[in-house]
């Protein structure tokens, strides 16, 4: 099976621009940013609750725990949120009712949690609309891991952030391209 496409900054900006033209612009943009800046799987994004991301005072947490039921493989893991994602989540929280911590963070058309499949379909619809035919719900996750690897983050740390039990799994996520290879040999 072919791996999901990693996106560059220009492609990500195109996706964000397109999200802003959709029926649920803030929700869709925040879903995309959660994929790219937290490296979460579609299933995990679909399962997020208000209480995962926002504290009792309505502030965005710096980190939260994904329960075993919310994550793949039946393991809990800590998700760390960078400043850009915390700001986007804060903007999203400003238009969302935060009073019930059990409510879905991202509500489907019908008002409940997205299923993993409908979340995957949302990603596919957005990527197809901007002409990214090899992108999928895993593109944000692969881009997240690849970008961190390119900035020198070690594979052991990457595996922990991604929730992988084995670093060999994480290594398969790291995209290598000609530009990186060219830059690598210049380090000598």
Image (tube, rainbow, N blue to C red):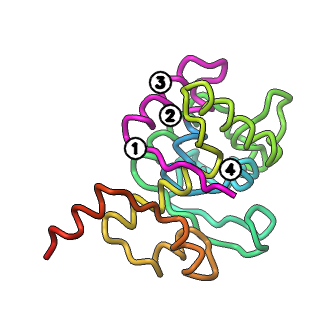
Q: Classify mark 2: helix, strand or loop.
A: helix
**Contact between labelled residues 4 and 3, with CB atoms less than 8 Å apart:** no
For the residue labelled by badge 3, is the local secondary structure a helix, a strand or a loop?
Answer: helix
Pick whichever of labels 2 and 3 is earlier in the sequence: 3
Residue 12 magenta-highlighted: yes
Question: What's the mark number on residue 8?
Answer: 1
Residue wearing tag 4 = 45
Tell me the mark number nearer the camera, choosing from 4 and 1.
Answer: 1
Query: In terms of secondary structure, where does tag 4 sit?
Result: helix
Quarter occupied by the C terminus: bottom left
Sequence-wise first label, 4 or 2: 4
Residue annotated with mark 3? 17
- The answer to whether residue 183 is left or right of residue 38 is left
Q: Residue at 51%, 73% (x, y): give it.
A: 171
* Contact, mark 4 vs mark 2 (Cβ under 8 Å): no
Q: Which residue is mark 2?
A: 91
Residue 9 lies in quadrant = top left
Check disc 1: other Cα within 10 Å, few if <14, some if 14-19, many if 20+.
few
Q: Which residues are magenta?
A: 1-29
């Amino acid at each position: 099976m072919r791996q999901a496409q990693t996106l560059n900054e220009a492609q990500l900006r195109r996706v964000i621009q397109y999200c802003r033209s959709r029926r649920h612009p803030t929700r869709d943009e925040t879903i995309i940013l959660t994929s790219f800046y937290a490296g979460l799987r579609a299933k995990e994004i679909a399962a997020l609750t208000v209480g995962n991301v926002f504290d009792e005072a309505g502030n965005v947490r710096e980190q939260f725990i994904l329960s075993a039921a919310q994550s793949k493989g039946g393991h809990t893991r800590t998700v760390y949120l960078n400043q850009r994602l915390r700001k986007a989540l804060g903007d999203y929280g400003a238009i969302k009712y935060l009073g019930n911590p059990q409510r879905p963070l991202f509500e489907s058309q019908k008002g409940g949690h997205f299923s993993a499949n409908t979340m995957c379909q949302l990603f596919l619809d957005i990527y197809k609309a901007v002409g990214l035919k090899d992108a999928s719900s895993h593109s944000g996750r692969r881009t997240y891991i690849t970008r961190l690897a390119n900035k020198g983050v070690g594979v052991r740390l990457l595996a922990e952030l991604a929730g992988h039990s084995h670093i060999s799994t994480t290594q398969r996520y790291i995209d290598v391209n000609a530009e990186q290879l060219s830059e690598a040999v210049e380090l000598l």
